[in-house]
Every structure is written in structure tokens, then in C-alpha cells.
Amino acid sequence: MKTVALVTYRELPDLTDDDRLVFDELRRHGSDAQAVIWDAHAAPWERFDGVILRSCWDYHFRHEEFSDWIRALERDGVRLWNPASVLRWNINKEYLKSLRDQGIAIAPTVWLTKGSTVNLEEILTRQNWAQAVVKPTVSATAFQTWITSPEKAPADEIAVRKMLQRSGVMVQKFVEEVYTAGEWSFIFFLKHYSHAVLKRTREGDFRVQNEFGGSFERAVPATPLVEQAQKIVDAIDEPLLYARVDGIAIGDRFLLMELELIEPALFLGSDPLAPQRFARAIIEAI
């Protein structure tokens, strides 16, 4: 019998409703699936055949501690998915630079390094952006993310300077199609496309996360969009158990916003066969 740890955090000790679907599916396949909190003291990680990161949703508040934990698992030879090298690369949104350099389309972005000085109004004026999204380079669930403009920039600059004391910051051109076309999430298991959802913003907000009133629905994307998402996943040399490719369709062109490889919600409940596909992928990986 294979033993599988589905890793969560203290606020969700029994996993999300979505992850319970794959938990149950693994049990039906004869695997001993267990929910384990990532910072649980003396958790026997080395005894599991596979340690699968799921809802570690406080990692961006404690990313140094989280990174130390990943290094410890790697040192002890724990079978971690996604692999430790992938997690380290994906934990900082500067990974988008390397994907851009490989020809992947991303939103135009200005990168600010930790400890640097900034003139936010000058950046927006120089880029000729009417609106831009500001967020830390280590972030999740739209943490410390907001829209600025040349008019708001002088006041917003104070907050950006505080953020730069703790981490890098990205200033990204706001893509208005998020209001009209929504944001796609393409889900892949072992680099094979599984399913997709289309996320929408709440009226009066730009964020698609349900914590901010966003919604999602199962949707069937056009083939060219799936092909572009596949190209993004294939750009990663390391093996991937799961990946979520988030982006916006502008016509038939896909603009990558995030490549989620650490702890993304996988919208398993949106497709009746998705939990089974994920469970089979886990079993194959371990």
C-alpha cells in the first residue's frame, strides 16, 4: 500500500473540500492518503511514498521558513511533489522573467528589487500606462495587490516603499480584458491537460479570487489557448505532478499571468473525472 501525504496548513487541517475529492479517490485506489500540516512538528515525512503540496496557503507570509522546510525535505530524500527545485523557482514571481525570455507572452512588467528606491508616478508615465497592478514578488491570493494610476501613484508610493523593505515588487500593466473576457485557469497533471475553468471578477473589483467576490465556472477553451498553455508547461524541464496556468485570452493570444506550481486550487470539483485523473497521476508519480 502506497502512503501519500496531502500537505495543508493549520487553518485547513482536514484539507479543502476540493482536495478531499482526490483524498477519497486515492483511498478508493488503495492508497493510504493522509492530511498533514506542513509545519507539524515531527511529521514523519520520510515515511511517505509521496508528499503532495496542496493548501499550504500561509507560505507567502512565512516564505523563509517555508523554504527552509523544503530544503530539509530535500536533504532527507523526501519524495516531494512538485519537486523542491520547481518550488524554489516558483516561489518568487520573477520566474515570469525566465518564461518571457523563452518567448512566453506575459503582461508588460517593471521589476523592482528589494531595498531599491522608486518613483511610481515616473514608472507609469514612462510606460504610458493608464493603470497598473502593484504586488510583491512573493505573494498569493492577491495579497497586498492593488491597482494604481498616475493620479494615485504619489500616495501609493509610500506603500510600495514599505513593501520594498520586505521583498521585491512588480508593477504590471493592467489588462482590462480581465473584466470582459475573464481569466482562464488551465489544469495539467503530469504535463497533460486535464480541464479548465473561467474566472470572473465581482462588479467593482479587479480580482478573480473568491475571497474577493470572484466566481468561476467550468468552461471549454479554444484549442489555440490550450496549445499555448501546453507550451508554457512544456517550458519547464523538471517533472511536474500538477500545474495551473492562469492567464487572459486576447483574441486567440494567451497572456500568462501566473504559473502556479506550489499550492494552487485545482478546481477538481468542476469536472467529475478530474479527481480520478489527479489520483492516477499521483500514483504514477510515486
Image (cartoon, rainbow, N blue to C red):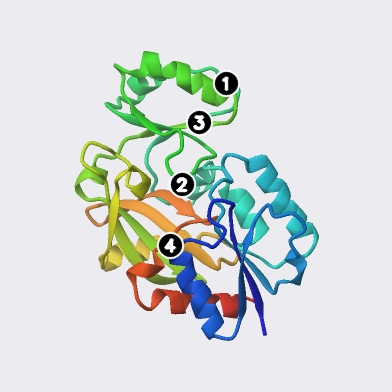
Q: Quadrant of residue 253?
A: bottom left
Q: Which residue is mark 4?
A: 231
Q: Which mark is residue 100?
A: 2
Q: CA distance from mark 4 to mark 1?
A: 34 Å
Which quadrant is home to the C terminus?
bottom right
Q: Which mark is residue 169?
A: 3
Q: CA distance from mark 2 to mark 4?
A: 12 Å
Q: Which residue is mark 1?
A: 116
Q: Alpha-carbon neighbours of circle 4 within 10 Å: few (<14), some, or many (≥20)?
A: some
The tag earlier along the polypeptide, 1 or 3, is: 1
Question: In the image, what residue type sits under mark 2?
Answer: Arg
Considering depth in this image, is 206 or 230 the residue closer to the camera?
A: 206
The tag earlier along the polypeptide, 4 or 1, is: 1
The reply to whether callout 1 and callout 2 are in contact (CB within 8 Å) is no
* Residue 103 shows in the view: no
Q: In front of the other: label 2 or label 3?
A: 3
